[in-house]
Amino acid sequence: MSLPSVETARATMLSAIVPLAAQAVSLTEADGCWLAEPVTAGRDQPPYDASAMDGWAVRGADVRPGARLKIIGESAAGHNAGVSLQPGQAARIFTGAALPAGGDRVVIQEEAARDGETVVLAAAPDAPAWVRPQGCDFRAGAVLLEAGTRLNPWRLALAASAGRATVTCRRRPVVALLSTGDELVAPGTPAGPHQIYDACAPALAAFVRRCGGTVVHLGPARDDDASILAAIDAGAFDLLVTVGGASVGDHDRVKPAVRSVGGSLSVEGVAVRPGKPVWFALLADGRPLLGLPGNPASALVCAELFLWPLIAALQGGSTNLAPDRARLHGPLAPNGPREHYMRAIIEPDADGVRRVRPMTDQDSSLVTVMAAANGLLRRLPGADGLADGAEVEVLVPIR
């Protein structure tokens, strides 16, 4: 049986996802959430003609070197001068303050000198106006952020500037992590001579949080159906991620256990390296399950390729996984029959050219290699060998 490509497998998985319900979220809690409704401006920003500098509010017709204007008031941010400028008059003004009625220019303080109750201008008539017109940032009724946008600190600032205390976002998905394997023990607990520490669970938990989800730990579970099903039954979640037990050996029990309780598998392996055993199913109640291989590199590479898009889709969003470009550092042998994501180091060379250097050993069990890498070099199935300096595709993981 031929295995689907990464793109085909991902599309199959995403077609089964139903976005979660929307709810109001305070701006202080909304970083990383996806908007379910657009954010619309309730008024102009700024809501008045505002000074862009400290200086003097004046009438443009009065601006010329040597002009002497009578000072009639002061305008500071949040405090209008309460005056109307007539010919020959000026008001002291500060950055962000509203221009007094009748004023249409600001002469910066470096181009003026106060002399008692008057100010003498040095600015030329064609000097900058130093005014931020009403609505120059956005107008009332404008859509500032579309539904499906992922919020970040910059976009939260935009929502706040529109006066929004809350935004309507999809609920953060609860992602359950279930590591499986008789050989696994949790870090910090005693390990037997033939056991290893569970490196995937804390790494994937951090990954889920960076994608906007919340984490529930269900494992590790033993390599038997009863232990696996008991762990699944104990969890309340929107997406289940199992780690390990995904291959075809006698001790790989996760898929048989899921099938035994009515789970339906739609992806049973992907033509990718590392991560060929990755799989996807819907549990009997319709909740999605992503099965990741147990080796840390396989699990985390497949988290980038599949888990991140699934978490986004549950929140009504989508991810841009289009590869970037870099120049190869050193030659590269031809690729095999599967799409290969090589752990690599991406950094600029002495000339500032972005270079990518694949790690020498790509064994998917090597945690030291994975920790040293800061990117992935993507190779298509059957790709030819490449010379030093060739342009290649790279993927920068979530960090």
Image: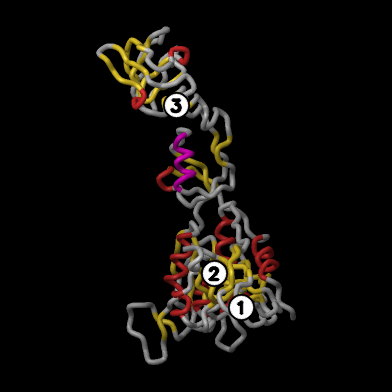
What residue span does the magenta drawing correspond to?
153-161
Badge 2 crowding class, 10 Å Cα cut-off, few under 14, some 14 to 19, many 20 or more, is many
Name the colour scheme.
secondary structure
Quarter of the figure that contains the N terminus: bottom right
Q: Secondary structure at mark 3?
A: loop
- State the mark number for residue 355: 2
Tell me residue 331's x, y (percent).
60, 80
Badge 1 crowding class, 10 Å Cα cut-off, few under 14, some 14 to 19, many 20 or more, is many
Q: Is residue 160 magenta?
A: yes
Is residue 69 positioned above or below 387 on the image? above
Tell me residue 275's x, y (percent).
59, 77
Q: Nearer the viewer, residue 20 or 208?
A: 208
Say which residue label 3 marks: 130
Q: Is residue 191 magenta?
A: no
- Per the model, the C-alpha gap separating discs 2 and 1 is 22 Å
In the image: residue 250, left or right of residue 208: right
User: Which residue is depicted at the point 48% across and 52% down?
Assistant: 32
- Residue 372's image quarter? bottom left
Badge 3 crowding class, 10 Å Cα cut-off, few under 14, some 14 to 19, many 20 or more, is some
Observer able to see residue 344: yes
Query: Which residue lies most toward the bottom here?
Result: 193
Of callouts 1 and 3, the N-terminal one: 3
Label 2 sits on what residue type?
Arg
User: Which residue is depicted at the point 41% across and 85% down?
Assistant: 196
Say which residue label 1 marks: 273
Which secondary structure type mostly characterizes the magenta part of the structure?
helix
